[in-house]
Image: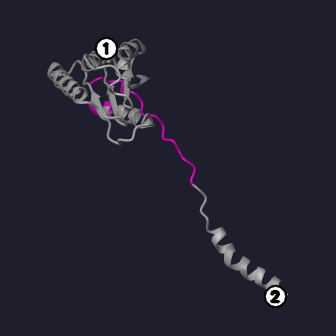
Amino acid sequence: MKNLFRLMLIACLVLPFAACKKAEAPKVEKPAVAMPTDPANKQGWMEYMGDIVTRNMDGVSNPNPYAYLLPAESAADFQDQYDSLLDKAKGDVARGIIAGNMLAYGGPSSAKTADLVTAAFKGVQPGTMKGVKVLFIGTPADGERVKAAVEPSGVTYVFVEAK
């Protein structure tokens, strides 16, 4: 009888703790942000690119990727912005990017964005950027051109078709 009483006492003490275990909330993946239809919609492009970057962060330890968003070619100061972004991209790559980082490139003009990436990686020594992820958002043809320019450096290349 004493053993039965002890078992019931233990069950009464343990049962509330077992019942309090909260069920894990199911992960709800938010829908993808649609690509803006207006090339001049800068805010829309920032949200679109941000969504793609966030979805491709696996294997990246730095939560703040290097992001290069090219403006629409119709912008009044497009060439100035392009030149400035190109200087920044070249400087970042020349300085060296350590493993665990991501370089993300995108914008309304896939061809101009591909030009920017290929120019930034010109002269990078083979195998010097292992562990770095390069994300390019654009058309498949431009994606292949970018792949050929960045892969010799040793990066992990990820292409996302802009759509």
**Viewer-side label of 1, 2:** 2
Queried whether the magenta region covers residue 77, the answer comes back as no
Q: Residue 2: which disc?
A: 2
Foreground of the two, 44 or 19? 19
Q: Position of residue 124 (x, y in %)?
A: 27, 20
Quarter of the view holding residue 102: top left
Quarter of the view holding residue 42: top left
Q: How many marks?
A: 2
Q: Residue 20: which disc?
A: none
Q: How many residues crowd around disc 1 within 10 Å: few (fewer than 14), some, or many (20 or more)?
A: some
Q: Residue 111: which disc?
A: 1
Q: How many residues crowd around disc 2 within 10 Å: few (fewer than 14), some, or many (20 or more)?
A: few
* In-image side of 141 versus 31 (left or right): left
Range shown magenta: 25-45
Q: Position of residue 73 (x, y in %)?
A: 23, 18
* Amino acid at the residue labelled 2: Lys
